[in-house]
Amino acid sequence: MQQKIGPTEIAAWIGAATGTCALVWDFIKWWYSERVSLKISASPGMLHTHDPTKKPHVMVVVTNKGKLTTTLTLLSFEVYDTWWQSKRGKPTLQSIVPHPDPGVLPYVLEPGKDWMGLTEQNNPELTKYKKYEYVYCSIHHSMSKPTRTRVNLPK
């Protein structure tokens, strides 16, 4: 003997499915809202207007798009031989920028605020990196793993 599914059972199943989806969606929103969200950009070839030598610089701008405050601790550059190494986070070469000009590290970055730092593009370390295809600039901070962006250094 087969039972017919009536409108009440259909409504119950729809209610259960939409309620479960709403609960999962609220969890996802909560999970990602309680994290630091940094956006980093690195622009090579920038000229400092007050520098009489007119040396090119790499300008790094970090924006805190999240709701939490974080402390920026270190600026670094990494080089990878292959795309796979870059995805695994296993650099071939690394270097740090201890004193990015005019930015100061460590720096407390409030939500919605920016930080900017410069480093000379033709310094000995970055000059070695020009022959590699996968060059990244990373900002290390107090809340999680470093945030990085790819840098296209001119050859």
Image (tube, grey):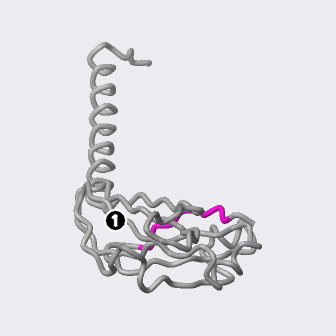
Q: Which residue is mark 1?
A: 115
Question: At 54% across and 67% down in the image, what residue appears?
Answer: 58
Would you say 77 lies left or right of 72 here? right
Quadrant in which the C terminus appears: bottom right
Residue 3 sits in quarter: top left
Viewer-proximal residue, 84 or 127?
Answer: 127
Residue 72 x, y percent position in the rendering: 33, 75
Would you say 7 lies left or right of 85 here? left
The amino acid beneath tag 1 is Trp
Secondary structure at numbered mark 1 = strand
Magenta-highlighted residues = 145-153
Question: At 65% across and 85% down in the image, what residue appears?
Answer: 124
Q: Is residue 16 above or below residue 40?
A: above
How many numbered callouts? 1
Question: At 58% across and 71% down in the image, what residue appears?
Answer: 55
Residue 13 x, y percent position in the rendering: 33, 27
Viewer-proximal residue, 149 or 25?
Answer: 149
Residue 81 x, y percent position in the rendering: 75, 74
Viewer-proximal residue, 129 or 23?
Answer: 129
Would you say 125 lies left or right of 3 here? right
Q: Is residue 104 above or below residue 30?
A: below
The reply to whether the magenta stretch includes residue 68 is no
Q: Is residue 105 above or below residue 34?
A: below
Residue 98 x, y percent position in the rendering: 44, 86
Q: Residue furthest front?
A: 52
Viewer-proximal residue, 6 or 40?
Answer: 40
Residue 136 sits in quarter: bottom right
Would you say 69 lies left or right of 89 here? left
